[in-house]
Structures are given as structure tokens and as C-alpha cells.
Amino acid sequence: MLSSLYGLRYGADQSEGSVYYTDWLQEMRTSKHNSLWTSARPIPKDIFSSQTGDTNELFTYAHSYPFRSTGETSDVIIAIDVKEEAVSHIIENMMPSQYQHTVIVNAAGAAVSKSQEQESGQSDMYAASLKKVLNLGDAKGSFDETIAESPYVVSYQTLPSTHWTIYSATPSSYYYEQSIMIQKLILGICLAALLIGLILSAVLVRANYSPIKRLVGRIKDLTGTASNQMTNEFRLIDSAFLHLKEQVSSLEETMIANSAAVRHKAVLNLLQGNPEHRPWKEERAALGIARPYAEYCCMLMNTGASSVEPDSIDQPEAIARLMHGLECLSLQDSRLIAEELPDKRLAVILCTDVASEALLDKFAQLLLAETRQQLQPDIQLSTGCWVSDLRDIHQSFNEAHTLMKYAYFLPELHILKDHSLLQREHSLDEIPQTLLAKFRDKLQGRQLDEAAGTIEQVAEHMRKGQYPADYCHFILSNMVFIYSDAAKNVRYKHPLQFGHPDLYHEYTSLRNILAYRSWLTASITTFMEETENRNSDRAVSTIELAKQYIEANLSEDLSLEAVGTKVFLSPKYLSKLFKEEMGVTYTDYVTSRRMEQAKVLIENNNMTIDRVASSVGYGTTAYFIKRFKEMYGCTPGSYVRSLTSAAMPEAGS
């Protein structure tokens, strides 16, 4: 034995002190468990001494080693002695006021601590309740018990490691002792409040000693009856109440007539999540809901009413019939509430006791079928999330509203319920700005196919990419503004198709991105065709002006810059027009006109070559002679001589 008190001892189980630890040692050697607690027993301070001395009440805690082994398979047994008074002090500190009624017992009901058993001296008094605790078999609990003709509250707690039970019996009066002072204080406050109430009552009765008289006076004031006129006061009150009844009846009729407006306002308050402006029962009554349901879901339908002509009379009637038909459907454990929103969309609230995606799909298909029969076939529907309280339906509506924003870009989807679309709302992706720049360049360059291809690319990016709906509409409106600026720059007024005041309002009337793509492509096509036709007419007139200026100023500066300034065209564009309209370059045309004028001057005047060159705009005679020879195959002098030689035979004849 290796002891912290006695050191190392061999054959300790054969020594005279072995009797003090034989109990737990023998029990551990045959135990199927790995630990053991003994009851408290007196142990001398020195178990190996023959001298008698003070003894202590000790518990012994033994545990096997290795720790996972049982007592009979262990190699070593570790034992720790614990003073019983230490455990008693712990319990006393936990419950100091009623410690004398607390005892620790083992599974058999015997007191573990001998000193407790001796000090209490009342084991028979608690025997019945102890037996009841052991028979219950619960790990912990409490109950009321009568002990020695006095009410007690018995509580117990089983220690899992030792299977000991801490038993405590507390007199019931103990719990009321603490509240006596509070009871007295409350009684005093009540008496004071009663006294104050009596005083206030006396004051108020004195101030309002005749409520009937005051009521009669008020009625006379309202009806115009003279205050000094003798009347039966009770009959006057009766007449006033009859009149009030008539007013209330009239008010009820007015409320019934306005029930649709009240209901509409109630639905809007729910969908917008506004704070309650009246009691919830009245709100639910306005909606026609007789009882609460387990789950609620909001569905939103794009009825297409905003795209219908304003003078259409059938549209509101069709929507009213549709709403009435939906609410009159006979549904088991479910109910539909339909209401038209200010943006002409139709909100449908599904109330049901059995919520499931299959049920939601079923109702969505039902709503689409009913709506298409009475409105138009290209109806789209979005569904929100389920909520357990109707007052939270705005959460479902917000989700359905967000999904409906993507109906513009996905017109082929009749039911929008894919919650992955909601993630696009938080995306920071951007459409490449090069596409907008390319669209602007192709538009200015009058390249129709490339501009239409860019529109197609932008539309596909929006349909397949992870871009927020609002951002996509921003890009689409930017493209409309780019097109509008290009048209304004050339002073082109486009014929509007839908009667709207400008291109942007025309764009907002389109139902989806496919219609936008077709509309913008067709509009740009018309713009480019009419612009080209107009440019062709302008080009002919501009060329004529340039030719007239050239004829009148052959001796002046006829560079592209000078002539372009006169006809308000850039030199590059003027050169392009001459090539396209005349079939020759600008330089060749000016040269030909100058040479023809020089030839006329040579034939009709006796001018020197230098003066002829100066008259047709050439600063150097040598360059004029070179150009003349290139044009006519001979120099001006040779041409003059040929004219002279040809004229002499004619003169001789």
C-alpha cells in the first residue's frame, strides 16, 4: 500500500490496521464497477498504532486503475478518505436554515452519516417519507407530506455516482415567514388606496352630483330646446337615443356601401406591413376571414392591365369578375383573398391549414387557368414564402414582388417560384460597358446589323446572367437614351408607335425584354433607312452647290477645306460625296473644270500662257503646262500653234 499518510507498506492487508480498509478493498476486488463510495465510519487517526486516540467519521472513495477497468480487473485501487464533517459543512452552507432536517441515505434507506443519524434522533419521524422517496425511484423531485401532524415540503436529489439520496424536509411555514412583512405592506397599501379612493369618490360625486341633469342640458343644447322649458327629462333622453339609433343605422349603411374600399385598404395595409390602425379582429372581419389558418402565402399576378388601352371598359369588369370567382371557389381547409393593387397587378392571399409546395403549385395553376379565361393568355404569376401569421404576409408579398420583377426578362416562365432569382437582387455583377460603347458607335456609324447584334447580346446577358432587375432596366433605358441622342443629333423625329410623348415612355409600355428587343431593332432600322434617304437627297443638293461655287471661282483657292466651309461640310465628307455621287475624286473634278476653262480661254482670247494659268487658279505656269499636257496630250503652246495652223488655211480660202 502506498499512502500519503503512511508511505509505502508491504503486506498492508495482513497488518493489524487492515480492518479499517478491508471493507472497501474487498468490495472493490469483486466489484463490476470502477468506483465505490463507503458509508461514514469511525477511523482512528493512526490505523497502524496500538494506541487509542481520536477517531474521525470518514467516507472513502475508491477507484480502479486503469480508470476504464472494473474493480476486479484493475491493477491498482486508488482510495481517498473524506471527512464526514466536510460533506456536512458543504450541505449546511447550501441550506443553512433547515440543515437539521437534511440527511443523506443510501439505496437501502440507511443514513450514510452516522453522526447525522445520531444528532437528528428523529429517524422514525422521517421514516415514512424516506420510504416514499425510495419507492418513487426518481432521480430528483419534491412533494408535500404531513410529518408529526405538521405540513412539510419534502425534496430529494440522487447523486448519480454514489446512488445516495440527499433528503430534506422543510416545514411549510418556513416559506410563508418571508412574506409576512410583504403581506403587511400590501395590506397597508390597500387600506391607503381604499381611503384615497373614498376621498376621491366623495369629491367626484360632489362635482358630478347630477349626471342626468348634465346629460339633459347637453341634449337641449344640441337640439336647440330652451333650457328653461319644462320637459320630461327621461322622454327627452329617450328621443335623443332614438335619433342616435337612426344615425348609427345610417352609418352602418354607409360602411356597408364602402366595405369594398375598407377591404381594399385592409389588404394594402397587410401587404405593405403598415402598423395596425385598428384592432386585429376588425381587420380580419373586413377581409372576410372567419377563423385563423395555419399558413398563409401571397401570390402576385401580372394581369397585363397596364398595357391595355385606357378607354377599355371590359378590363375592370373582367378583373372584378375574376376576383369574385376566386373568392367563391369551394376549397377544403383553404381560402383565397384576391385584391387589385394600384399598379394593376392582382394579389392573391392563400389561407390554408396544410401548407406544401405541391398545394402551392396546384393553386398557382388554378389561378393561371382562371385568369387566362377572363383576361389574356400571357399572364405570369409569382409566389412568395409561407408565413404562419397573416400579419406577416407582407414578407411573402415582398418576395413575390421581387420575383415578379424578373418576369420582364423571363417571359417564357408562367410561374416564377425559383428562389435563386432572389440572389440576383444582391449581385454586384455589371454588364460589360463595352457593349454600350459598341452600340453607340454602331448607331453613329449607321451599321444596322452590328447595332441589332449588340441589342441581342445585351438581352441575352440579362436573361442568362446574374444581374439585378433594376440594374437591367437601368441599362435598357440607357440604350434608349443613346438611341434618342443619336436621333436628336441628326434632327430626326421618329414616328412613335404607341402614342407616347417620347421614346422612353414608349419603352416603359413594353411587356417584356423580347418585345423590347424587337421594338428597338425595328425602330433603329426605320431610323437608319430614313436617315440614309434624307442624307442622299441632301448630298445631291450639296454637290450642286459645290459645283456652282467651283465654276464661279476657278481662279481662287478650291481646296477641300475652302469649298467644304462654303457648303458646311467637312473636307472628308465632301470628298466622299463627290466620289459617291460624281464617280470621280474631288481633285480630278476640279482639275477637269480648270482645264476645260483654260482650253476655252486659249481658243477665244489672245492671252499668254501665264495669264491663262493664273486665270484658272494655277500659281506656277510649269505646273499648269504639266496638268494641261496630262489632260489633252499636248502643251498649251502646241495647242495654240495647232489652232493657228488650222486657222490659216481657212483664212486663205
Image (cartoon, rainbow, N blue to C red):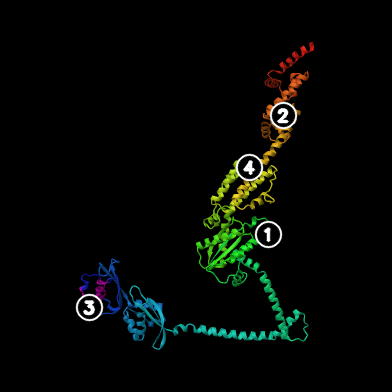
Q: Are marks 3 and 2 in contact (CB under 8 Å)?
A: no
> Magenta stretch mostly in which secondary structure?
helix
Label 2 Cα neighbours within 10 Å, binned few <14 / some 14-19 / many ≥20: some
Of the residues under marks 3 and 4, which one precedes in the sequence? 3
The mark lying in front, picked from 3 and 4, is 4
Residue on which the image places disc 2: 558
Where disc 4 sits, the SS reads helix
- Do callouts 3 and 4 mark residues in contact (Cβ within 8 Å)? no
Marks 2,1: beta carbons within 8 A: no
Position of 200 with respect to 615 (left or right) is left
Q: CA distance from mark 3 to mark 4?
A: 119 Å
Residue denoted by label 1: 313
Residue at 63% across, 45% down? 522
Disc 1 to disc 4, C-alpha distance: 41 Å
> Is 44 in front, or is 384?
384
Numbered disc 3: secondary structure: loop
Give the x, y percent position of residue 552: 76, 28
Q: Which residue is pictured at 61% across the width and 49% down the height?
A: 516
What segment is highlighted magenta in the picture?
14-31
Would residue 56 be counted in the magenta stretch?
no
Query: What amino acid type should be assigned to the residue bearing mark 4?
Result: Leu
Closer to viewer: mark 1 or mark 3: 1
Q: Earlier in the sequence, mark 2 or mark 4?
A: 4
| Residue where numbered disc 4 is placed | 443
Residue in the picture at 61% in, 61% down: 346
Q: CA distance from mark 1 to mark 3?
A: 120 Å
Q: Position of residue 366 (x, y in %)?
A: 55, 61
Q: Amino acid at mark 2?
A: Leu
Of the image marks 2 and 1, the number of the one nearer the N terminus = 1
